[in-house]
Image (tube, rainbow, N blue to C red):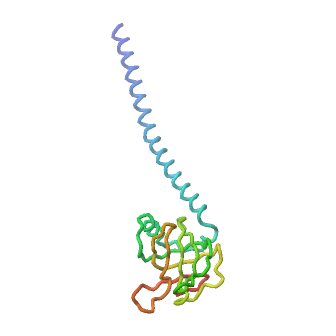
């Protein structure tokens, strides 16, 4: 009788241990997957919120190929003299700089949220008439670090042919 009782208790213990490990093994991958899913969903939501916060509806007209990550890295590491291509939304149109070579100046917000000052030489390239806050614009020029986000210049041809030619594209027209 004692053997039957011991065998019964042993069987119950084995079933309990098997049930414990069986349930734990089933829950572990599911909970790991859930944590990974939550991290991915959170990352997607953060990126979506960032893009909605920093770029308005005109961004639909902007090209997807750009050097925003390259510009962001140059800003974070305080690097300059980097040839970049990107686009953004005009956040402010500033007064022209008429000291020395004349430059049309405006602040552009990139798709990643960083803002840069564009200094477009209007002695070497046509001025962009009608440029307004909220307009989409594409550029190819040289990035220079500044504490406020950076400056994009050389957005024109180089008559001396010592520098890569740059450009601005606005409403279907290229300014070079």
In the rendered image, residue 103, in percent from the top left (x then y), is placed at 55, 83
Nearest the viewer among 2 and 49 is: 49
- In the image, residue 17 sits, relative to residue 168, either above or below, namely above
Residue appearing at x 43%, y 38% in the figure: 28
Q: Name the quadrant containing residue 142.
A: bottom left
Residue projecting furthest to the front: 99
What count of labels does the image hold? Answer: 0
| Relative side of 56 to 31, left or right | right
- In the image, residue 89 sits, relative to residue 100, either above or below, namely above
Nearest the viewer among 171 and 14 is: 171
In the rendered image, residue 44, in percent from the top left (x then y), is placed at 53, 56
In the rendered image, residue 70, in percent from the top left (x then y), is placed at 44, 69
Q: Tell me the quarter of the image containing the N terminus.
A: top left
Residue projecting furthest to the top: 1
Q: Name the quadrant containing residue 144.
A: bottom left
In the rendered image, residue 130, in percent from the top left (x then y), is placed at 66, 82
Residue appearing at x 44%, y 43% in the figure: 32
Nearest the viewer among 124 and 112 is: 124
Residue projecting furthest to the bottom: 159
| Relative side of 83 to 116, left or right | left
- In the image, residue 159 sits, relative to residue 72, either above or below, namely below
Nearest the viewer among 94 and 74 is: 94
């Amino acid at each position: 009788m004692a053997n039957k009782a011991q065998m019964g208790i042993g069987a119950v213990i084995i079933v309990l241990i098997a049930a414990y490990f069986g349930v734990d093994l089933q829950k572990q991958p599911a909970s790991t997957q859930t944590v990974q899913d939550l991290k991915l969903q959170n990352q997607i939501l953060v990126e979506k919120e960032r893009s909605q916060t920093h770029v308005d509806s005109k961004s639909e007209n902007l090209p997807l190929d750009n050097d925003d990550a390259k510009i962001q890295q140059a800003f974070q590491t305080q690097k300059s003299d980097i040839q970049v291509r990107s686009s953004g939304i005009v956040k402010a149109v500033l007064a022209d700089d008429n000291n020395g070579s004349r430059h049309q100046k405006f602040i552009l917000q990139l798709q990643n949220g960083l803002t840069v000052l564009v200094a477009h030489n209007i002695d070497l390239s046509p001025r962009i008439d009608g440029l307004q806050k909220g307009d989409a614009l594409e550029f190819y020029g040289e990035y220079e670090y500044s504490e406020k986000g950076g400056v994009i210049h050389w957005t024109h041809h180089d008559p001396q042919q010592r520098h890569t030619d740059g450009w601005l594209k606005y409403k279907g027209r290229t300014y070079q």
